Image (spheres, grey):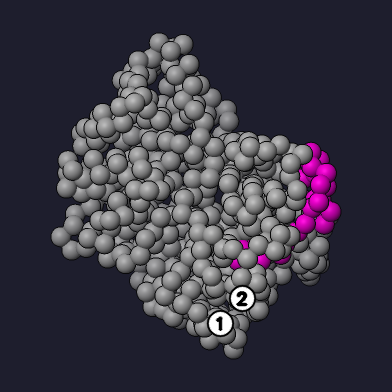
Amino acid sequence: MNVVGVSAFYHDSACAVVVDGRLVAAAQEERFTRRRHDRDAPLYAYRSCLELAGIGPADVDLLAYYENPRRKLSRQLWLALADDADPGRMPRLDATQPERELRERLGFDGPFVTVDHHEAHAANAFYCSGFEEAALFTADAVGEWTTTSYGVGDGDGIQITGEVPFPHSLGLLYSAVTAFLGFSVNGDEYKVMGLAAYGRPRYYDRLAELVTTGPDGQFRLDAGLVLPRLGGPLYPDSLAARLGVTPRLPGGEIAETHRDLASSVQLLLEDLLGQALEYLHSAHPSENLCYAGGVALNCVANSRLRRRGPFRHWFVPPAPGDAGSAVGAALLAHHRADGDRHVRRLADARLGAAPGRGALTAVLTEADVAYEDYTGRESDLLERVTDLLVQGAVLGWHQGRMEFGPRALGGRSILADPRDPAMRDRINQRVKKREEFRPFAPAVVAERAADLFELDVDSPFMLETAAVRPGVTLPAVSHVDGSARIQTVARDVAPRFHALLTCFGRRTGMPVLLNTSFNVAGEPIVNDALDALSCFVRAGLDALVVDDILVLRAAVPPAWRDHLSRAADRHAPRVHNDSYSFFL
Ligand SMILES: [Fe+2]
């Protein structure tokens, strides 16, 4: 049975294919269209996933959409009818649009089902967890009417047993403060998470006054904290007076008050999540927790809460946000249609396409650009790459299938030496052009992770943070509070990346590399080999490795850089994350 899952028309459109219960492909549309957070029908992702599954459109037995447009419509109407809503900014509300548009765009005329938004989140976590039974928890801004859900999963399927209704939302709370701090909602929340480590939570009490918690995992946000309205701002003007903090303008200076507010909202989020999980555990006592939804991307909160208990074993999927709901919708629809009772473990997030090197070598040969070909000589390639890294190179590393989810995990990564204190600033200023306060992450061979970091679990999807152990010096990947967001790399999951880390470790004593996503600021992560070549040139990386091919910066004709820079300006990425689209 072939089931396709789709999330679309909000942000981060994606597609997934499940064949006989196995997740065989998943991809996000932005990687193909090069439009960050692309929300259109995932046509390119659909084609790519079908190709990876080895099936054609006629072989798709069921298409599952990640939310229920009819249930969502009533919430959209409620928002649109708010007292002072501007009718001119009211969107055309149409619950039939997703099915109609997907059928038209994807050319699909088979059975179409919808699953509820939080069911899709919960299924994404549970059906990739490998747990026979687990408590289920989801938290995001909003899906249909639900912002937070509690449930249980076992061989009989998943069941949502409790919900917190809109507009009382942990995701909205965090997004409101994200907007207040001058960052983009629905995308820049992780900047607030990074900034939090620099501040003190001295606004905690004032923020906490705006939230009331109740029994059974319920909570309510005061109207003074969020102002959900179509086309309107995310927070009321009165919030500044209530907090005693001036909102930061986008791009403005980050003051101590802003750092402290970030710290406060992070701590409040952790405390509210902690209370929610205590309730969930009382309702569904289990050692296992499956957790998804946009809030689950807050890896700082996840790590602290996992250590605190009561759940001992956590599973957060590699794409816990709405893109990952394409996976959840497909897996849930499969289990419901097929009666499958099996829950498989997802060990590898590399679910996308592996564009070959052919297009790259053709371009390099045509342009007379020298490259080194290590086909059949992997150890020579790894020694060469290690040489470059030890000499301080910042290197584009493009290998095999593309990762699904927001993190680069060694498939589409920029790698560098984590021991170099100047590396972080160098990459930030030259390559990523991002805020200085944002840390870079380490990838480490799984078998040495506990020696170097205070980490007691595997973190294959880079969703755990832990302190760097005393005596271990990794300045380029250590946050201001001494923590790091760690990816553990297992030999059997990613053999070549593991071998590179091992090679670097043999040379330096530290089997760790700085691993950041292969893109420049404002663009999606690179997809195919030509995206990688373009990004390598424009970002001024020192070297590029695509499969077995190595290209050095010195070999790149100067004209390429000028040409590609102009092309990049013409195709400046669009971002779909304004407050208006936030509620659509
Ligand atoms: Fe969601």
Residue at 48% from the left image edge and 16% from the top image edge: 362
Residue 338 makes an appearance in the image: yes
Q: Residues within 10 Å of mark 1 (few under 14, many from 20)?
A: some
Kind of residue at badge 1: His
Left or right: 536, with 209 as reference point: left
Q: Pick the quarter of the image with the C terminus.
A: bottom right
Say which element carries label 1: loop
Check residue 113 for magenta coloring. Answer: yes
For the record, the magenta segment spans 95-123
Instruction: Please state the horizontal and vertical placement of residue 303, each as a whole percent of the image.
Output: 39, 68
Query: Closer to the camera, 398 or 518?
Result: 398
Q: Which mark is residue 284?
A: 1
Left or right: 220, with 518 as reference point: right
Q: Residues within 10 Å of mark 2 (few under 14, many from 20)?
A: many
Residue 523 makes an appearance in the image: no
Check residue 60 for magenta coloring. Answer: no
